[in-house]
Image (spheres, rainbow, N blue to C red):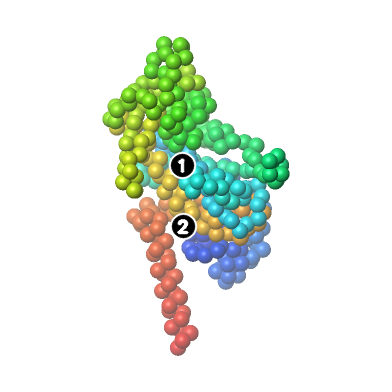
Amino acid sequence: MKNSLLELYSDYLMSSFAQTTATGLSQLLDHAVSHDQITRFLGRADFTSRDLWSLVKPTVRSIEADDGVLIFDDTIEEIPYTDENAIIAWHFDHCRQRTVKGVNILNCLTVADDVNIPVAFEIVRKDLLFCEVQTRQLKRHSAVTKNELLRQMLRVCQHNQLRYRTVLTDSWFSSKENMAFIKVELQKDFIMALKSNRTVALSLEDKRQGRFVRVDALPLQENTVLPVYIKGLSFPVVLAKQVFTNKDDSNGVLILASSDLQHSYDRITTLYQKRWNVEVFHKSIKSNTGLAHSPTRTVRTQSNHFFASIYAFFKLEQLKLKHHLNHFALRSKIYLKALQASYAELQRLSA
């Protein structure tokens, strides 16, 4: 899938520092491509994970490995001034601890050799309308949960014969259904963070007798692992307790569950540290590829703009390898060149 208009539009997202519009791109190209051509391109067909895979597949094949990782996480980008629809809806943002209007995207990245490549994505669709009894207000609900979307995306990765060994997620995706699907059906491994109220049995006999305790009550020491049975799972996992320091100098605790019983504490924490790459990805698509900087109004054009933003991240990642600069440094170089061109034009007009 090599689309010349997609290449133009994604380049425009990488080089623009304001709202990205069809008119703006047409003017940038001296009207070599018309406003209507760009609008028709964004509204012609739905770009999906299948299209993304066809674009990134050659690069993935060159770096993938049997012991690779897949990272899943979702992000919410606030878009407060756009009309509400199935994908621009109200979502609870756990980082801000409040409900915001915007887009919620579940992403899947593969990481190898300091290269982060998005291989699948799903935009959360709140396509079911209902009336809340207490407030009598019309609200939206998703027909498919994010955990179900994660399993669908894993099936797509399996269909694409993507090579990996371990799935990394935070505690929001550590459901027993996801764990069983990854370990039993896909025959892969996972490392997931657990919430403190999850219950486990310390032995198979305790599991059979129904003796479960909360993970925050376990005698789990740092730098050690503990084999346990998570309630609802047929297979054992090992737990690792990681203590870290927050920005405000307070201590945080992370309980990690690994389905590979041979993993040591260092192996579990080293692999899970790669999950941070998806946070870098989310920051870049919001800051460097104009995720929310489009005035598109329909579900299809909005979805296709988000797709182009994710693809633009992949193109920045290729430039990162070529020039040995991170995304923000690359954008700074582009911005400096734009300022220099603006200053030169001002001097010409003044003369």
Nearer to us in this view, 244 or 307: 244
Picture coordinates of residue 172, whole percent (x, y): 49, 36
Identify the amino acid type marked 1: Leu
Picture coordinates of residue 312, whole percent (x, y): 49, 54
Total labels: the figure holds: 2
- 267 in relation to 113, above or below: above
Q: Which residue: 44% across, 48% down?
A: 281
Query: Do the residues bearing badges 1 and 2 touch, measured as CB atoms within 8 Å?
Result: no
First-in-chain label (1 vs 2): 1
* Label number found at residue 164: none
Is 136 left, or right, of 337 in this rendering? right
Q: Disc 1 and disc 2: Cα gap in Å?
A: 18 Å
Q: Which residue reaches farthest left? A: 223
Picture coordinates of residue 179, whole percent (x, y): 48, 27
Nearer to us in this view, 26 or 140: 140
SS for tag 1?
strand
The answer to whether one can see residue 165 in this image is no
- 238 in relation to 105, above or below: above
* Label number found at residue 109: 1
Q: Which residue: 32% across, 26% down?
A: 220
Q: Quadrant of residue 236?
A: top left
Identify the amino acid type marked 2: Asn
SS for tag 2?
loop
Q: Which residue: 47% across, 25% down?
A: 183
Q: Residues within 10 Å of mark 1 (few under 14, many from 20)?
A: many
The answer to whether one can see residue 133 in this image is yes
Quadrant the C terminus occupies? bottom left
Q: Which residue: 37% across, 59% down?
A: 329
Q: Which residue is mark 2?
A: 288
Q: Residues within 10 Å of mark 2 (few under 14, many from 20)?
A: many
Picture coordinates of residue 247, whole percent (x, y): 34, 48
- 158 in relation to 78, above or below: above
